[in-house]
Image: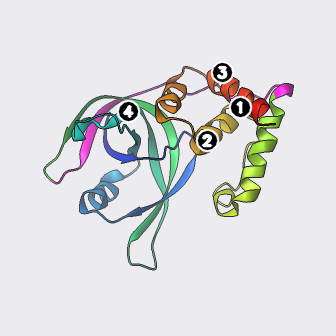
Amino acid sequence: MKLALFPLSAHLLPGGIMPLRIFEPRYQRMIAEAGEQGFAICMLDPRQPDALRNMYPIATRVRIVDFDQLPDGLLGITVLGMERVRITDLWQESDGLRVGEVEVLPPWRTGRLNADQHSLARALQEVFNDYPEYAALYRNPDWDDASWVAQRWLEVLPIPVEQKQWLVAAEDNQPALSLLSGLLVASH
């Protein structure tokens, strides 16, 4: 599958919601051409000296779920993370938009949090309470689903991008849940 690539210092995972401000002409074209297929949000790799390839290979295909004109006249969009993808090839078009060939990765299995993991959901609820503008993006948070909770934590947790990319690339949510449980125990 061919997708336009949108590099960011933040990352979005399946089920995640993110507002974006679009102002560069190449990204305006990306939005105009996105359709149902969407585009991919990629994590920037600050260690990569090649400007064309300064993105980690695991990205998230997103689709636009809302858009409006912002008070400053820029285009505002809201995207929903659909699925993880791996960038297998990439190139830059004449206007600077990077495009990649991607393969879809299997989704993390959904399932209920174990009894000893409910504290992860409670701590994430505290984050939502502390940041109501972030919480407002999620009309129906799935506090019981282990993958949903792990993915929201990976989006907001300030850990090194290399570690975040490794966790996002995992076949399932277990490495993320183990790390999150360890961090929560260490912080309390």
Which quarter of the figure has residue 2?
Answer: top left
**What residue would you read off at disc 1?**
183
**Does residue 174 appear to the left or right of 49 in the view shown?**
right
Q: CA distance from mark 3 to mark 2?
A: 16 Å
Three-letter code for the amino acid on which mark 2 is drawn: Leu
Residue at point 48%, 33% (across, down):
84
Q: Residue 61, percent across and down?
A: 44, 40
Label 4: few (<14), some or many (≥20) within 10 Å?
Answer: some
Q: Image quadrant for the N terminus?
A: top left
Q: Secondary structure at mark 4?
A: strand
Using the image, tell me which numbered label, if any, was put on residue 56.
4
Residue at point 69%, 31% (across, down):
180
Dot placed on the residue nearer the N-terminal end, 4 or 3: 4
**What residue would you read off at disc 2?**
157
Using the image, tell me which numbered label, if any, was put on residue 174.
3
Dot placed on the residue nearer the N-terminal end, 2 or 1: 2
Q: CA distance from mark 3 to mark 1?
A: 14 Å
Q: Image quadrant for the C terminus?
A: top right
Q: CA distance from mark 1 to mark 4?
A: 24 Å
For the residues labelled 2 and 1, say whether their Cβ atoms are less than 8 Å apart. Answer: yes
Viewer-proximal residue among 119 and 1: 119
Residue at point 66%, 21% (across, down):
174
Which of labels 3 and 2 is toward the front?
Answer: 2
